[in-house]
Image (cartoon, rainbow, N blue to C red):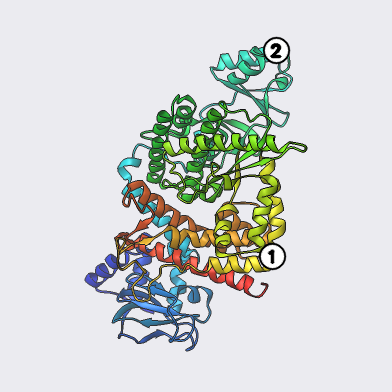
């Protein structure tokens, strides 16, 4: 059989068009030589049906050359589910699964589209790994391409930076300096001096790390404690040190260091020590490094000095964005550094107050409680404390006044560091949110049993709490108590579901996006209230209904997916969509496009890939709401 051919000028024109749109933008020349001669250009007049979901299986594969197409899962009198424009393809899911289309596709205006037959569609999947991945992981692929575009946009910034996706094993530059547990401290110190290192790893017979000894340990556990140099090093080492496998990335090591506040990571291969990687190996950033920031936090003598460090956190975040680091990793890093700042403020302020006889815990709420802080965030925090048995009313009042004064100074200091005071007063210095363990339970029980609109609003903020400083056992008990009372509370969960379904994703009926059409924000949409909030609210309902103690949105969705037996690929796609919206928020905040409304963007100012990914992310938000409704509409 003769292979189809295409005139050179037509071939070049079609290839130039396809290369502007994923997945064809990364497709090989061999795949183009197969694809282009098999495409047929078809015309569909305005309002005509292009694919009828009731007309039978196996329509051709469509690539929109010009025009706008809508799709609907129900009849033509219902609202469209999707709006597709130039460069987008359909019906990818039905053809990939080999089944009947579940949507009807209609031309909004005059449409020209390239058509590819079913058999050729299947052959193209076998010829092109890029096209195969697009068919099975459309959202993930688009997200990766979006990050690649972001990297190219910041190419000048990223030119001198090492990739944080490199495996740790590639960064190990020398053999590890080790000893066994019976080695004397004197001998261990000789090895450290002979190898010019500041730490030594203690290993067992299988070469697995069981401890680490550093110069800090020498100061704190040997010199100051007047310990003999002839004792076994096991007596003074730090046990159970943090490790990561050699296959882990530099980014993962960076996150662990940010959370733990240490300066090197032990690298293992199948449990055996292969070496260490230090911060200076990981963070060759242009302006600031993680180590510099943490050192600056510890060294800052004044609040203005700490405020300068807060600016460095923004610079670091921008550098990580330039490297294409994912939103999940970036927000974890930003949250960890912001936690360190808050810890420093709490520690310094605590020196001026006598809280030694009070069991208390500083609670992070909202985005900070979820570990999802962006570069523009205000304060949401609270205090929980335990009233000791037999304490007089007067002493209880004195302790509460002391806690409120302490919290007020902390809130003011954080405000000076660039974390604005909460306009709604949700801060530990507000007497309403500085409560005893018993009173917090009473307050939560009131919201659970009388779920008014205000109570639901409070639940959205306060039920995402985590301990930040003080006695974490207080918040652990509160979380356990709360989850035991939400799982079977059908009225409360029903209203939480309804609350989570109130916000509709800003997908347009005709145009791709629904933007504000008047007022000061005309032509923009809010990525927080109409984007990430949809995922956050749904994940919170899943957590409260299934007894999930995690507060992070991504982890809540993953754990709920396992418990509800949802295919992992569907969960991953949902999480990818949430993270992409976070990336857009961070990019907008990093550039300072909208200083007074940092979560707003003009979606039509995005490049083609980002517009497509934004549409996919918002479609995933709609699907998540539908899953939430289907999961609980019957059981509630």
Please tell me which residue is depicted at 30% across the width and 67% down the height of the picture: 518
> Which x, y percent locates residue 288?
39, 33
Q: Against 350, is 490 above or below?
A: below
Classify mark 2: residues with Cα within 10 Å, few (<14), some (14-19) or many (20+): some
> Which x, y percent locates residue 11?
27, 70
Q: Quadrant of the N terminus?
A: bottom left
Measured in 3D between alpha carbons, the distance from the residue under mark 1 to the one under mark 2, in whole angstroms, is 58 Å
Please tell me which residue is depicted at 68% across the width and 45% down the height of the picture: 437
Taking the image as shown, residue 110 lies to the left or right of residue 541, namely left
Q: Secondary structure at mark 2?
A: loop
Q: How many tags in the picture?
A: 2
Residue found at the far right of this picture = 390
Classify mark 1: residues with Cα within 10 Å, few (<14), some (14-19) or many (20+): some
Is residue 516 or residue 41 the one in the foreground? 516
Name the residue tied to disc 2: 227
Name the residue tied to disc 1: 489
Mark 1 or 2, nearer chain start:
2
Please tell me which residue is depicted at 32% across the width and 48% down the height of the picture: 592
- Location of residue 611 (image quadrant): bottom left
């Amino acid at each position: 059989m003769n292979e189809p051919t295409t005139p050179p000028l037509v071939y070049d024109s079609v290839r130039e068009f396809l290369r502007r749109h994923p997945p064809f933008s990364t497709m090989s020349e061999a795949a183009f030589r197969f694809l282009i001669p098999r495409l047929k250009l078809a015309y569909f007049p305005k309002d005509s049906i292009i694919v009828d979901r009731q007309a039978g299986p196996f329509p051709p594969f469509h690539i929109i050359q010009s025009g706008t197409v809508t799709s609907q899962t129900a009849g033509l009198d219902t609202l469209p589910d999707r709006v597709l424009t130039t460069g987008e393809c359909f019906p990818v899911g039905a053809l990939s699964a080999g089944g009947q289309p579940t949507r009807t596709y209609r031309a909004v205006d005059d449409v020209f589209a390239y058509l590819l037959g079913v058999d050729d569609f299947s052959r193209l999947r076998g010829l092109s790994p890029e096209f195969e991945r697009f068919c099975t992981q459309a959202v993930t692929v688009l997200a990766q391409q979006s990050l690649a575009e972001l990297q190219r946009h910041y190419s000048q910034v990223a030119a001198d930076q090492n990739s944080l996706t490199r495996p740790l094993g590639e960064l190990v530059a020398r053999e590890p300096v080790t000893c066994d547990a019976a080695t004397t401290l004197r001998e261990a110190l000789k090895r450290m001096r002979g190898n010019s290192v500041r730490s030594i790893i203690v290993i067992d017979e299988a070469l697995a790390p069981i401890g680490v000894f550093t110069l800090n340990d020498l100061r704190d556990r040997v010199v100051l404690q007047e310990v003999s140099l002839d004792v076994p090093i096991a007596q003074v080492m730090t046990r159970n040190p943090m490790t990561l496998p050699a296959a882990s990335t530099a980014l993962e090591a960076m996150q662990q260091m940010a959370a733990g506040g240490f300066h090197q990571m032990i690298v293992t291969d199948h449990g055996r020590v292969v070496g260490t990687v230090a911060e200076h190996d990981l963070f060759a950033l242009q302006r600031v490094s993680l180590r510099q920031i943490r050192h600056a936090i510890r060294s800052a003598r004044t609040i203005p000095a700490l405020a300068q460090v807060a600016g460095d956190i923004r610079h670091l975040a921008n550098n990580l964005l330039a490297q294409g680091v994912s939103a999940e990793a970036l927000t974890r890093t930003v949250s960890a550094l912001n936690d360190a700042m808050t810890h420093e403020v709490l520690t310094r302020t605590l020196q001026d107050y006598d809280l030694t006889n009070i069991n208390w815990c500083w609670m992070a709420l909202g985005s900070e409680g979820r570990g999802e802080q962006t570069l523009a965030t205000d304060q949401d925090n609270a205090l929980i404390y335990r009233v000791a048995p037999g304490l007089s009313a007067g002493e209880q009042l004195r302790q509460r006044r002391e806690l409120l004064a302490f919290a007020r100074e902390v809130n003011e200091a954080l405000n000076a560091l660039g974390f604005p005071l909460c306009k709604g007063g949700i801060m530990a210095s507000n007497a309403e949110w500085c409560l005893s363990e018993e009173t917090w339970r009473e307050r939560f029980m009131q919201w659970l049993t009388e779920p008014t609109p205000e109570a639901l609003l409070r639940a959205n903020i306060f039920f995402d709490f985590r301990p930040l400083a003080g006695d974490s056992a207080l918040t652990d008990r509160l979380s356990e108590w709360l989850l035991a009372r939400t799982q079977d509370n059908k009225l409360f969960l029903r209203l939480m579901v309804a609350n989570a379904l109130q916000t509709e994703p800003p997908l347009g009926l005709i145009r791709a996006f629904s933007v504000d059409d008047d007022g000061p924000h005309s032509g923009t949409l809010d990525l927080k209230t109409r984007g990430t909030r949809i995922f956050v609210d749904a994940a919170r309902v899943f957590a409260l209904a299934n007894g999930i103690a995690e507060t992070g949105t991504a982890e809540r969705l993953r754990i709920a997916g396992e418990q509800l037996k949802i295919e992992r690929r569907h969960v991953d796609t949902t999480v990818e969509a949430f993270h992409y919206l976070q990336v857009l928020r961070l990019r907008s905040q990093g550039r300072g496009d909208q200083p007074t409304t940092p979560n707003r963007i003009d979606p039509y100012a995005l490049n083609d890939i980002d517009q497509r990914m934004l549409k996919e992310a918002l479609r995933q938000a709609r699907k998540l709401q539908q899953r939430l409704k289907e999961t609980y509409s019957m059981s509630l």
